[in-house]
Image (tube, rainbow, N blue to C red):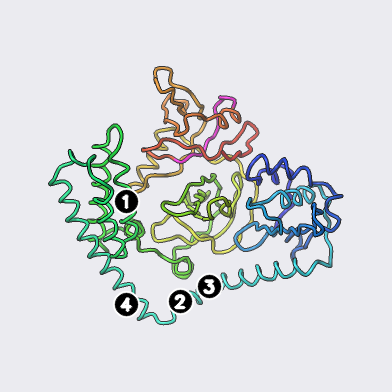
């Protein structure tokens, strides 16, 4: 169930400025001859629906589910690939201005969509028992075969790594891609797809200035991964979960819901960042949360095809009281059920030293971690004058600084005016600091 939103809440959902501009043009009562609110059984609003007049003979059918499984959900018959589209934004804007009122009757298409979502939610809540394998012994045998195959592949990788070091790195720039691909393909055959992807990244590390140090670091991390996999149960639970995920032994979301660690807390949404998923036509959205009570960091991963927007289960600048099921690595999560959402103050931040300590603690559990969320308090963008590349930094009140990955942080500068602010960002030693959200002087979160 959702409380009434403000128009600022609505426009914060816009995927880009052009979507907001387009939505403003149709956010008029005359454009929506049919519209209504579906009330929740316990009061408040469950969903908003409407039929928007378009250029054709048929209206665009638009609905927004405000308390459905997985958070806010959108449906529209328009061809836009943006989520939410301009029609959904316009409908929500009218609702926020109290120009959409509850109606007992609703079109069949609305009832069918909402009942389908309710059915999926019911299945998800009952998933703990349903997710148990029908034949546990067969499932265990399949897993053992997979682990043995991966183990053989990792043994072969260990010998290959020794050969690379024995031969020396001087001739590496002359190697063709076939040199790396042969090992990567053998790992695929061994069902170690994660390790294969890491090997496939080696040619990129063997280029440009400083390539010997970069390549040696990547080879060392691969060697560490081989040793960690061979260590098995001797590792800590989270490190072992991270190792299995890195080599390519995945855990299904159903299994996480059935037996994963569950944590109930109020989760503060720090922000998100979209990246291209390696060697696929998918885009990944990394959304970071921090437990207010537990201090636990949680990562929600969603995906969409290139050209589409990955789903966003939570909004930046909000608190979500919910139960999350954690993957074995201790960070990735699956929401167990919907929770209450409320506006939140800026997250508690720290100095640069504290941010680096947080990253070091994450690496201690997962040495292959190359990205981690940090929150800097009273951080100000600054440009290093002696830096010939003109690189930008975020500086804390103590004068310590971290370099920004983006050479032109104009959006950050526009929001802060160059003044200190609370900034949530992803820190990667190889890239630098990538801001994902900033809180303006009024305490409102702005996604970057």
> Where residue 379 appears, x then y in whole percent?
50, 30
Rendered image quadrant of residue 48: bottom right
| Furthest residue toward left | 166
Query: Disc 3 on helix, strand or loop?
Result: helix
Q: Which residues are magenta?
A: 417-426
Q: Please name which of the two marks, 1 or 2, marks the residue nearer to the observer.
A: 1
In the depicted view, which residue is nearer to us: 392 or 344? 392
Q: Which residue is mark 4?
A: 141
Query: Disc 1 on helix, strand or loop?
Result: helix
| Residue for point 52% across, 35% down | 423
Between marks 4 and 2, how big is the CA–CA gap?
Answer: 15 Å
In magenta stretch: residue 244: no
Q: Which residue is mark 1?
A: 200
Q: Which residue is mark 3?
A: 127
Rendered image quadrant of residue 372: top left
Q: Please name which of the two marks, 4 or 2, marks the residue nearer to the observer.
A: 4
Mark earlier in primary sequence (4, 1): 4
Query: Disc 2 on helix, strand or loop?
Result: loop
Q: Quadrant of the N terminus?
A: bottom right
Residue 289, visible in the rendered structure: no
Q: Quadrant of the C terminus?
A: top right
Q: Which residue is mark 2?
A: 132
Mark earlier in primary sequence (1, 2): 2
């Amino acid at each position: 169930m959702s409380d009434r939103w403000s128009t600022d809440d609505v426009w914060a959902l816009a995927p880009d400025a052009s979507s907001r501009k387009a939505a403003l043009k149709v956010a008029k009562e005359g454009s929506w001859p049919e519209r209504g609110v579906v009330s929740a059984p316990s009061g408040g609003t469950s969903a908003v629906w409407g039929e928007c007049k378009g250029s054709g003979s048929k209206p665009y059918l638009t609905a927004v589910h405000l308390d459905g499984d997985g958070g806010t959900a959108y449906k529209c018959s328009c061809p836009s690939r943006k989520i939410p589209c301009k029609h959904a934004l316009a409908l929500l804007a009218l609702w926020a201005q109290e120009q959409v009122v509850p109606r007992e009757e609703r079109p069949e298409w609305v009832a069918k969509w909402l009942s389908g979502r309710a059915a999926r939610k019911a299945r998800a809540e009952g998933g703990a028992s349903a997710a148990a394998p029908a034949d546990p012994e067969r499932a265990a045998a399949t897993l053992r075969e997979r682990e043995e195959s991966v183990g053989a592949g990792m043994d072969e990788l260990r010998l290959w790594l020794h050969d690379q070091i024995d031969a020396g790195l001087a001739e590496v720039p002359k190697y063709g891609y076939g040199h790396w691909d042969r090992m990567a393909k053998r790992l695929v055959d061994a069902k170690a797809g994660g390790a294969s992807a890491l090997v496939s990244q080696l040619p990129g590390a063997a280029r440009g200035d400083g390539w010997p140090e970069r390549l040696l670091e990547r080879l060392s991390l691969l060697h560490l991964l081989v040793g960690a996999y061979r260590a098995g149960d001797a590792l800590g639970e989270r490190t072992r979960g991270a190792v299995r995920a890195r080599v390519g032994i995945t855990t299904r979301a159903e299994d996480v819901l059935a037996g994963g660690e569950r944590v109930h807390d109020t989760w503060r949404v720090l922000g998100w960042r979209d990246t291209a998923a390696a060697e696929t036509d998918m885009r990944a959205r990394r959304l970071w949360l921090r437990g207010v009570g537990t201090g636990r960091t949680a990562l929600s991963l969603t995906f969409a095809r290139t050209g589409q927007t990955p789903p966003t289960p939570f909004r930046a600048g909000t608190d979500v009281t919910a139960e999350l099921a954690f993957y074995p690595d201790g960070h990735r999560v699956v929401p167990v059920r919907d929770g209450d959402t409320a506006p939140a103050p800026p997250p508690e931040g720290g100095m640069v030293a504290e941010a680096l300590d947080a990253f070091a603690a994450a690496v201690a559990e997962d040495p292959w971690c190359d990205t981690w969320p940090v929150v800097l308090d009273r951080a100000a963008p600054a440009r290093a004058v002696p830096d010939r590349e003109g690189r930008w930094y975020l500086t804390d009140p103590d004068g310590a600084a971290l370099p920004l990955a983006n050479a032109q942080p104009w959006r950050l500068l526009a929001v802060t005016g160059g003044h200190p602010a609370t900034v949530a960002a992803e820190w990667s030693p190889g890239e630098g600091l990538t801001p994902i959200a900033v809180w303006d002087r009024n305490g409102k979160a702005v996604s970057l």
